[in-house]
Image (tube, grey):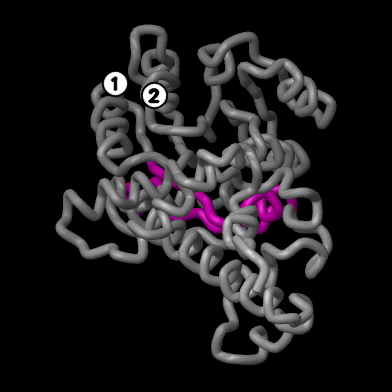
Amino acid sequence: MATIGFIGLGNMGGPMAANLVKAGNKVKVFDLSDDAVAALVAEGAEQAKSAAEAVADVEFVISMLPASKHVRSLYLEEQGIKGAIPKSALVIDSSTIDAATARELAVELNKVGVRFIDAPVSGGTAGAKSGTLTFICGGDEADIEEARAVLGQMGKNVFRAGEHGAGQVAKICNNMLLAILMAGTSEALQLGKANGLDPKVLSEIMLQSSGRNWTLEVYNPCPHVLEGVPSSNNYQGGFQVDLMKKDLGLAMDTAEQSGAVTALGKLVQSLYSEHSSDGSGKKDFSSIFNHFEPKRDV
């Protein structure tokens, strides 16, 4: 088993690190939240007093942080850990960040002899807990092959999208489509509900029809259609609206830089921005369902 430094123990990182511990690895963990660290220590992880301590004498470094600025700060700023990482280690960043930052990390870490891959994930908190995530990787093929053994303890799929940064581009394409599907599914369910249909029955109908999609099947946005999903828990847990809004911003920035046409992406970005401004930023992104509630009685 491997010795791993894991930094970032939030809704995704915490369960991911826990699965590495359960697989028998020596996992040194660090997070700004003492409670998050304590939860992992209770699972059998080793507490590190700093990010630099977490990466000392490890074979792999895994980070799972909210945004590009946090990743840059961790690795590249004056108090960053770039110089503390063993030259034999492989750095795996599973945060969702802009591709340019991922490429910068690869270059800067390479300058000090450290290898890097970007490996953002898909599968949500449920996938993080069950160890069924999909890792979407960018980097050298040999490094991704080396990472497979560790990634396979946290997920069931590992893809190489291309060179450094490609994992991030593929991830934001996926999340843009996910946001569009979630908004469209919510709109359709609210339309049916407003016209007297039972959302559970309508969901079953659409699941057997051409409107079938992942959000209907495993992450239904309407409360109590499915149990064990955020919509049936007052939209708590899961993937926050503000994080989806961030990812949509990354997608739109990438589209602008490449000249891609993303008309639906722009529309859903505006919907999630409005939903966040309504005070729903910390709720799960499926709460966009509430944004489509009828504005008046018919």
Q: Which residue is mark 2?
A: 87
- Residue at (66, 79) in percent of width and height: 192
Q: Calculate the distance from the C-alpha at mark 1 to the C-alpha at mark 2.
A: 7 Å
What x and y, as percent, mark residue 261? 22, 64
- Residue at (82, 64) in percent of width and height: 224
Vertical relation: 125 (above or below) 210: above
Q: Is residue 61 magenta?
A: no
Element type where label 2 sits in the image: loop
Q: Amino acid at mark 2?
A: Lys
Packing grade of label 1 (10 A; few <14, some 14-19, many >=20) is: some
Frontmost residue, 124 versus 292: 292
User: Which of pointers 1 and 2 indicates the residue nearer the eye?
Assistant: 1
Element type where label 1 sits in the image: loop
Frontmost residue, 250 versus 156: 250
Q: Quadrant of the C terminus?
A: bottom right
What x and y, as percent, mark residue 89? 45, 30
Q: Which residue is mark 1?
A: 112
Q: Quadrant of the N terminus?
A: top right
Q: Amino acid at mark 1?
A: Val
> Relative to 63, is 233 on the left or the right?
right
Frontmost residue, 185 versus 47: 185
Please state the extent of the stretch shown in magenta in the rendering.
117-143
Vertical relation: 104 (above or below) 178: above
What x and y, as percent, mark residue 68? 38, 32
Image quarter of residue 207? bottom right
What is the number of the mark on residue 18?
Answer: none
- Residue at (61, 68) in percent of width and height: 215
**Circles 1 and 2 in contact, beta carbons < 8 Å:** yes
